[in-house]
């Protein structure tokens, strides 16, 4: 009989996880509310004299501090929450669809396609007939075109998962180079596009939030409607077919949903990488692989991560502000390398 303590440790870890699992959603929701409250309070201007009662009842709206709260910080915090939801949902969907922990809208070229589409809309917006909707619309078209090209070049149904990822990485680099070239040719827009490519919420407000929300809600709805089938597809397409899932239809709807959510975030906040890679892993560690629990947990985690990242970005080096995309890349790139080393040792 073995005296190893490892089985007892594993049993204890499972007991702790079983205890934490039901508390994950309410606990994360409470953390998100705390993060949002800190995001509203802290910043370059001290707003401690505005009471929460005055803020909630809109009595502070006519003051200078109220204008900062309602017109600058509130839409910025809400945009960070929406972006966190979108990137986490998109990353979870991609990882489940491709059954690969390295899948991420940033790495697979979807973000770069959306960024190129949005960049075209920003530069040529005055000549386009779509008005204020040009940026999210072009971002969606760019994301969808990038997905189509990746699958076409990888060989579609016959493609291996690794080939889709490799083509996605190459496609992302190519589309980012195209966007850089576009920026170089239009020097008058270079500073706007440069900071937009780094990703962040500086200068964004109600207009960007209201433009991206319809696309984000549509994308999240598509993913939610196919969530049960996506759960089954994690077992592999053959097993999913044997269980009655229309795999091709489900894949197309999920690709459209993940592309819509990515495009919505990219159009409003630029390219914020690695959130869709890191957060789904943390969610699965917390509540297990069942997407009915993991997806909402990942969305809340993504929102908390981006609200906190934005808070750090605009306060840690004040009055200078660091783009949020730089901070998430500093967190996500080491995690990506860790996953590669872990896969190699497995």
Image (tube, grey):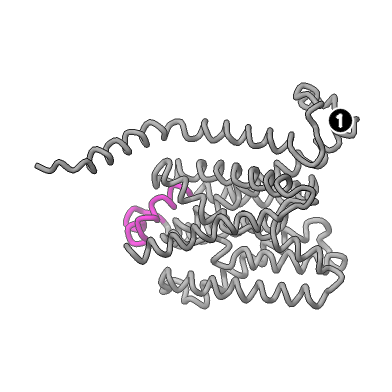
Percent x, y of residue 27: 52, 32
Q: Secondary structure at mark 1?
A: loop
Residue 146 higher or lower than 211, as above or below = below
Query: Which residue is found at the position 46% from the left and 76% from the top?
Result: 155
Residue topped by disc 1: 61
Query: Which residue is found at the position 44% from the left and 59% from the top?
Result: 101
Percent x, y of residue 31: 58, 34
Identify the residue at the far left of this view.
Answer: 1
First to last magenta residue range: 227-245
Nearest the eye: 58 or 241:
58
Percent x, y of residue 90: 55, 54
Residue 308 higher or lower than 139, as above or below = above
Q: Quadrant of the C terminus?
A: bottom left
Nearest the eye: 312 or 114:
312
Q: Quadrant of the N terminus?
A: top left
Query: Which residue is found at the position 47% from the left and 57% from the top?
Result: 250
Identify the residue at the far top of this view.
Answer: 53
User: Does the stretch in magenta take in 194?
Assistant: no
Magenta: main secondary structure equals helix
Residue density around tag 1, few if under 14, some if 14–19, many if 20 or more, within 10 Å: some
């Amino acid at each position: 009989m073995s005296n190893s303590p490892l089985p007892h440790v594993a049993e204890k870890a499972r007991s702790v996880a079983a205890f934490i699992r039901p508390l994950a959603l309410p606990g994360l929701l409470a953390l998100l509310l705390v993060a949002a409250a800190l995001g509203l309070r802290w910043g370059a201007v001290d707003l401690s004299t505005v009471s929460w009662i005055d803020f909630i009842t809109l009595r502070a709206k006519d003051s200078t501090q109220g204008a900062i709260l309602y017109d600058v910080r509130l839409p910025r915090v809400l945009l960070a929450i929406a972006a966190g939801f979108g990137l986490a949902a998109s990353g979870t969907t991609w990882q489940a669809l491709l059954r690969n922990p390295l899948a991420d809208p940033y790495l697979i070229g979807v973000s770069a396609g959306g960024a190129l589409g949005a960049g075209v809309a920003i530069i040529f917006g005055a000549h386009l007939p779509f008005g204020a909707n040009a940026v999210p619309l072009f971002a969606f078209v760019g994301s969808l075109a990038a997905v189509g090209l990746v699958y076409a070049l990888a060989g579609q149904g016959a493609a291996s998962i690794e080939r889709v990822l490799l083509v996605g990485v190459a496609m992302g680099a190519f589309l980012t180079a195209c966007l850089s070239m576009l920026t170089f040719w239009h020097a008058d827009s270079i500073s706007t596009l440069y900071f937009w490519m780094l990703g962040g919420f500086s200068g964004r407000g109600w207009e960007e939030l209201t433009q991206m929300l319809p696309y984000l809600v549509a994308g999240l709805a598509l993913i939610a409607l196919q969530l049960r089938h996506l759960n089954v597809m994690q077992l592999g397409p053959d097993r999913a077919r044997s269980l009655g899932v229309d795999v091709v239809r489900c894949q197309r709807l999920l690709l459209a949903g993940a592309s819509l959510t990515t495009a919505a975030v990219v159009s409003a906040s630029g390219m914020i990488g690695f959130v869709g890679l890191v957060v789904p892993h943390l969610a699965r560690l917390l509540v297990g692989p069942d997407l009915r629990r993991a997806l909402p947990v990942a969305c809340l985690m993504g929102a908390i991560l981006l609200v906190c990242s934005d808070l750090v970005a605009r306060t840690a080096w004040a009055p200078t502000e660091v783009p949020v995309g730089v901070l998430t890349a500093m967190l996500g790139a080491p995690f990506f390398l860790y996953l590669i080393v872990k896969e190699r040792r497995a």
